[in-house]
Image (cartoon, grey):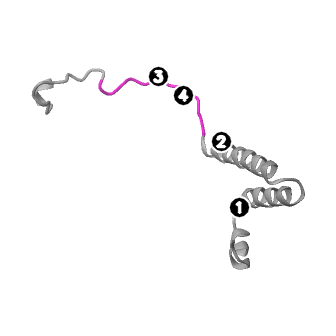
Amino acid sequence: MSGWREFTHLLKSPRGDIAVLFITFLLTVFIELTVAIQVGVLLAGFLFLQKMSNETHVDLITQNFKDDDENEVRDISSLNIPNGV
Protein backbone atom coordinates (compact mmCIF):
# COMPACT_ATOMS: atom_id res chain seq x y z
CA MET A 1 0.00 0.00 0.00
CA SER A 2 1.07 3.57 -0.41
CA GLY A 3 0.95 6.34 2.12
CA TRP A 4 -0.65 9.74 1.96
CA ARG A 5 2.53 11.30 0.59
CA GLU A 6 2.39 9.06 -2.44
CA PHE A 7 -1.29 9.91 -2.87
CA THR A 8 -0.57 13.66 -2.81
CA HIS A 9 2.17 13.08 -5.38
CA LEU A 10 -0.39 11.37 -7.64
CA LEU A 11 -2.59 14.47 -7.46
CA LYS A 12 0.10 16.39 -9.37
CA SER A 13 -0.53 14.18 -12.42
CA PRO A 14 -2.50 15.31 -15.50
CA ARG A 15 -6.25 15.76 -15.04
CA GLY A 16 -7.18 12.79 -17.20
CA ASP A 17 -5.01 10.46 -15.17
CA ILE A 18 -6.51 11.77 -11.94
CA ALA A 19 -10.02 11.21 -13.33
CA VAL A 20 -9.18 7.60 -14.22
CA LEU A 21 -7.74 7.10 -10.73
CA PHE A 22 -10.77 8.46 -8.90
CA ILE A 23 -13.35 6.77 -11.12
CA THR A 24 -11.58 3.44 -10.73
CA PHE A 25 -11.32 3.97 -6.97
CA LEU A 26 -14.99 4.86 -6.59
CA LEU A 27 -16.11 1.92 -8.73
CA THR A 28 -13.93 -0.38 -6.63
CA VAL A 29 -15.51 0.84 -3.41
CA PHE A 30 -19.14 1.05 -4.51
CA ILE A 31 -19.52 -1.64 -7.19
CA GLU A 32 -16.87 -4.31 -7.72
CA LEU A 33 -13.16 -4.59 -8.40
CA THR A 34 -13.49 -6.35 -11.77
CA VAL A 35 -15.89 -3.71 -13.09
CA ALA A 36 -13.59 -0.96 -11.84
CA ILE A 37 -10.59 -2.50 -13.59
CA GLN A 38 -12.48 -2.87 -16.86
CA VAL A 39 -13.74 0.71 -16.79
CA GLY A 40 -10.30 2.00 -15.76
CA VAL A 41 -8.58 0.22 -18.63
CA LEU A 42 -11.16 1.52 -21.12
CA LEU A 43 -10.86 5.08 -19.81
CA ALA A 44 -7.07 4.91 -19.91
CA GLY A 45 -7.23 3.58 -23.48
CA PHE A 46 -9.48 6.42 -24.62
CA LEU A 47 -7.24 8.91 -22.84
CA PHE A 48 -4.22 7.46 -24.63
CA LEU A 49 -6.00 7.69 -28.01
CA GLN A 50 -6.88 11.31 -27.32
CA LYS A 51 -3.29 12.19 -26.40
CA MET A 52 -1.93 10.47 -29.52
CA SER A 53 -4.45 12.16 -31.80
CA ASN A 54 -3.43 15.54 -30.38
CA GLU A 55 0.23 14.79 -31.10
CA THR A 56 -0.17 13.79 -34.75
CA HIS A 57 -0.77 16.20 -37.60
CA VAL A 58 -1.40 15.54 -41.29
CA ASP A 59 -1.13 18.12 -44.07
CA LEU A 60 -2.05 17.95 -47.73
CA ILE A 61 0.91 18.10 -50.10
CA THR A 62 0.16 20.53 -52.91
CA GLN A 63 3.43 20.26 -54.86
CA ASN A 64 4.90 17.43 -56.86
CA PHE A 65 8.21 16.26 -55.46
CA LYS A 66 10.83 14.27 -57.35
CA ASP A 67 13.00 11.75 -55.60
CA ASP A 68 16.54 13.05 -55.15
CA ASP A 69 18.09 9.77 -56.21
CA GLU A 70 15.91 9.35 -59.31
CA ASN A 71 18.71 10.42 -61.68
CA GLU A 72 21.56 9.09 -59.55
CA VAL A 73 23.69 6.27 -60.93
CA ARG A 74 24.53 3.67 -58.30
CA ASP A 75 27.84 1.84 -58.43
CA ILE A 76 27.57 -1.54 -56.70
CA SER A 77 31.34 -1.98 -56.50
CA SER A 78 31.58 0.78 -53.90
CA LEU A 79 29.34 -1.16 -51.51
CA ASN A 80 30.84 -3.44 -48.87
CA ILE A 81 29.12 -6.75 -49.68
CA PRO A 82 30.30 -9.94 -47.93
CA ASN A 83 31.43 -12.88 -50.07
CA GLY A 84 28.73 -15.38 -50.88
CA VAL A 85 25.89 -12.89 -50.85
Q: Nearer the viewer, mark 3 or mark 2?
A: 2
How crowded pointer 1 is (Cα within 10 Å; few <14, some 14-19, many 20+) is rated as few
The amino acid pointed to by label 1 is Pro
Total labels drawn: 4
In reply to whether residue 46 is colored magenta, the answer given is: no
Nearer to us in this view, 39 or 55:
39
Q: Nearer the viewer, mark 2 or mark 4?
A: 2
For marks 1 and 2, the one nearer the N-term is: 1
Nearer to us in this view, 21 or 2:
2
For marks 3 and 2, the one nearer the N-term is: 2
Tell me, for residue 14, which label it has, or none: 1
Q: Residue at x 43, y 25 (%)?
A: 65
For numbered disc 4, what is the local secondary structure?
A: loop
The amino acid pointed to by label 3 is Asn
For numbered disc 2, what is the local secondary structure?
A: helix
Instruction: Tell whether 76 sits left or right of 67.
Output: left
Quarter occupied by the C terminus: top left
Read off the residue under disc 2. 53
For marks 1 and 4, the one nearer the N-term is: 1
- Residue range (magenta): 57-69
For numbered disc 1, what is the local secondary structure?
A: loop
Q: Residue at x 20, y 22 (%)?
A: 73
- Vertical side of 63 occupied by 10: above or below: below
**How far, Cα to Cα, is label 4 from label 3?**
8 Å
Q: Residue 64: x, y in percent?
A: 46, 22
Instruction: Tell whether 24 sits left or right of 74.
Output: right
Tell me, for residue 61, which label it has, or none: 4
The amino acid pointed to by label 2 is Ser
